[in-house]
Image: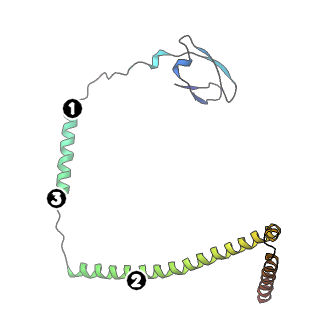
Amino acid sequence: MIITCPNCNKQFKIENSQIPNEGRDLQCGSCNHVWFHKIEDENNEVLRLNEEIVSKQLESKAETKNEKIIEAKQPQEKIKTDKNYNKKKIISENRKKSTTSINKENKGSKFFSYLVVFIISFVALIILLDTLKNPLINVFPRLEIILFNLFETLQDIKLFIIDLI
């Protein structure tokens, strides 16, 4: 059963066995409002249909719809002309040309995407090496010279790029 707080309208799911027939006090978990709740039997009645539906009207509507569907399913004849054939041929050639140009554009953009990913990964590796330089040197003592040379090379590349700009 779902119970709604009268103060803040928050809904709670509560089992029927937790509320006795005479009712009980409930407290909202959101606003701490306390109210008395009693199970009402007026909603437990089974709804009954007072009028019967006339099935003849429904059957006649269904028959007319089936007739329309059968008429629509009958094959239609297509008229083939030289003009239609030529138009289709031109359209198919245009599609082939457009797909080849799209494929060429995709290859260029794919290469650019891979290049960007490579550059970002390389920069992340350099940052990681710089961050963990001291622990790595403690484990691998000869790594200090290699890292020093790598950072000097990167500094030279940076200065070269700045001079180009």
- Specify the segment rendered in magenta: 47-54
Q: Nearer the viewer, residue 137 or 10?
A: 137
**Mark sitting on residue 97:** 2
Q: Are marks 2 and 3 in contact (CB under 8 Å)?
A: no
Q: How many discs mark residues in the rendered view?
A: 3
On the image, the x and y values in percent for residue 128 come to 75, 69
Secondary element type, mark 2: helix
Residue type (three-letter) at the residue carrying disc 3: Gln
Q: Nearer the viewer, residue 91 or 112?
A: 112
Secondary element type, mark 1: helix
Q: Residues within 10 Å of mark 1 (few under 14, many from 20)?
A: few
The quadrant in which the C terminus is found is bottom right
* Residue with the mark numbered 3: 74
**Mark sitting on residue 128:** none
- Which image quarter: residue 151? bottom right
Q: Is residue 80 magenta?
A: no
* Residue with the mark numbered 1: 55
Query: Nearer the N terminus, badge 1 or badge 2?
Result: 1
Which residue is found at the position 40% from the left and 83% from the top? 97
Query: Nearer the N terminus, badge 1 or badge 3?
Result: 1
